[in-house]
Image: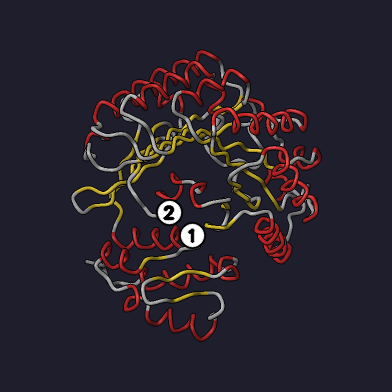
Amino acid sequence: MFYTIDPNRELSLYIHIPFCITKCDYCAFYSLPDQKEKTIDQFYHVLRSEIEEVVALRKKPFVTVFIGGGNPGVLGSARLLEIVSIITSLGRVEEFSIEMNPESLTNEMDILFTHGINRLSIGIQTLNENHLQTLQRSASKDSTFNALRKVNQLKLDYHLNVNVDIMTCIPGQTIEDSIFDIDTIVEIANPDHISLYNLTWEEGTKLTKKKNAALLIPINEEEEREFLIQLWQHLQEKGFHQYEISNFSKQEKDVCKHNNRYWALKDYIGIGPSSVGSFHKDNKFIRITGISSVQHYISSQTKYTEEIISKNAEMIEYLLVRLRVVQGIDKVDFNTRFNYSFDDLFSDELQFLKNNMNNEVINAQNSFSLTVSGLLLSDSIISLLTQPLFKTHTPT
């Protein structure tokens, strides 16, 4: 179904590697721990064939590529290098990212950074051994610190753009613990970008089951808010500028271009089990989703489902992603994209926000965005704005 995309259209690519060494207790992504080498190899050969098929259909390089998971490092450097080489045969990718867990960031991976990958995203989460144990991370404290030192060297050797994932609001964690994590990571690894996430309690995960059994006590909403207020301010003091609810960069050039394309609902495709892609064709917004099964992916000809997203659903999604971003909604872009005036469609809701939450929103002539305090209430504001889209009218 990838053949339906205009080969000259700007396009991003996401590749999902659904393997991990162990599965963290909080993880709700489709990933499988401790898989046999035979399964990994069978998966890889199908994946490589799909990537070759997609590349053969393209007439220009991908704008951005992100290899994520799971832990892509499980594939090993040789397989990853083949994937990178196939993709870059089209030409240089403006931003080519790979996700990696600390225990997989070995010296053998260096070759990837001489063949086209120019951004590394490493999942540290926390440096505290007790909190690592709560999350059931496979990386030990020692391997995590080794990875941070390795990251700093990679930056020097290959001029990589580096992101570090940090998790907050872990049961038993204090704001001081999180500040220690941030300060130590910045001092050792000198990252260009930090993604700061609250722990989320996803249904079906081991962590949520422990919470439901009263084995863990979650941090309450008021405490979470205080975590974010203090940590956002601390990151600002460390030179990191917030450009999205959970993402901070040192400079404009350090923002994640791949995620920015997601947050603008620009065209991208996903390859692999549980991957997601969406693109526009013939005035339709199409979503393709990989079936969440490695065995199905290996053995079946039908690996993806296709769905046409309605205009209402697309507008709702647009609001959801754009109001996560500090820049917010460009009203001209909204009007052009949906053939609706943003101010007219949401006139009642905008008036309500002006009367009741004026300090949380910035409603300018050509844009609508949330202030820092508004970002903390983004779920409520987005819920308010999407109300008209659940009514009976259908956009043209």
Per the image, label 2 sits on a secondary structure element best described as helix
Per the image, label 1 sits on a secondary structure element best described as loop
Q: Is residue 112 above or below residue 205?
A: above
In the image, taking residue 57 as reference, residue 64 lies left or right, namely: right
Pick the front one: 315 or 307? 315
Q: Where is residue 199 in the image (x, y as percent from the top left)?
A: 66, 50
Where residue 348 sits, quadrant-wise, is bottom left
Q: In this view, does 351 lie above or below 115?
A: below
Q: Say what amino acid the circle numbered 1 marks.
A: Val
Pick the front one: 14 or 301? 14
Count every numbered label the image shows and give the total: 2
Q: Name the residue under label 2.
A: 263
Q: Where is residue 227 in the image (x, y as percent from the top left)?
A: 71, 60
Q: Where is residue 143 in the image (x, y as percent from the top left)?
A: 73, 28
Q: Say what amino acid the circle numbered 2 marks.
A: Trp
**Badge 1, how many Cα within 10 Å: few under 14, some, many 20+?**
many
Where residue 386 sits, quadrant-wise, is bottom left
Q: Name the residue under label 1.
A: 325
Q: In which quarter of the image is the N terminus?
A: top left
Disc 2 vs disc 1: Cβ atoms closer than 8 Å? yes
Q: Quadrant of the C terminus?
A: bottom left
Most distant residue in the top direction: 38
Q: Is residue 241 above or below residue 14?
A: below
Where residue 92 sits, quadrant-wise, is top left
Q: Which residue is drawn at 73% across and 42% down?
A: 187
Marks 2 and 1 sit apart, C-alpha to C-alpha, by 7 Å
Residue 117 appears in the rendering: yes
Q: Which residue is drawn at 29% across and 73% down?
A: 341
Q: Which residue is drawn at 50% across and 19% down?
A: 40
Q: Which of marks 2 and 1 is nearer the N terminus?
A: 2
Q: Position of residue 277 (x, y in %)?
A: 36, 42
Q: Is residue 295 above or below residue 276?
A: above
